[in-house]
Amino acid sequence: MVSVAKQRSRSATHPLSRGSQPREYLRGVRGGFGNQGKRSKKGAKDWKRKTKTTKRITVLYTCKTCKKAKGSKSAIRSSRIEIGEKVSK
């Protein structure tokens, strides 16, 4: 019988990485009460900006004679794009 090893994703947590919580508790750096300096601050996910203020807009160019359409290579991050009479938000 041939079996395949369980794959871990690239963003999987590493429980014994240098600054991980379980390792800090084992070392005795963390625990108890009061201010623990940099370990007291919550993760960036909790205090940073929650959403983006603008949206990525892909512009589609259409030829007037042959009606062929071609999209822009990279999307433009903008709150509003105005081309002629067309307005995209």
Image (spheres, helix red, strand yellow):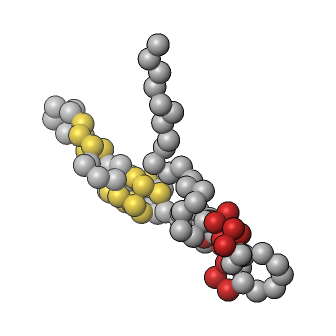
Q: Is residue 29 visible?
A: yes
78 lies left or right of 60: right
Instruction: Give how far across and how far down residue 39 sits, in percent.
Output: 67, 78
| Residue positioned 47% across, 31% down in the render | 5
| Residue positioned 50% across, 51% down in the render | 11
- Up the image or down, 29 lies above or below 81; here it is below
Instruction: Give how far across and how far down residue 35 sits, in percent.
Output: 76, 86
Instruction: Give how far across and how far down residue 19 sits, in percent.
Output: 57, 70
Q: Residue furthest right?
A: 33
- Up the image or down, 82 lies above or below 6; here it is below
Closer to the camera, 27 or 32? 27
| Residue positioned 42% across, 55% down in the render | 56
77 lies left or right of 25: left
57 lies left or right of 29: left
Quarter where residue 51 is shown: bottom right
Quarter where residue 61 is shown: top left
- Up the image or down, 85 lies above or below 18; here it is above
Closer to the camera, 47 or 27? 27
Closer to the camera, 62 or 70? 70
Q: Is residue 41 visible?
A: no
Closer to the camera, 50 or 64? 50
Instruction: Give how far across and how far down residue 21 sits, in percent.
Output: 66, 66
- Up the image or down, 9 lies above or below 41; here it is above
| Residue positioned 71% across, 75% down in the render | 28
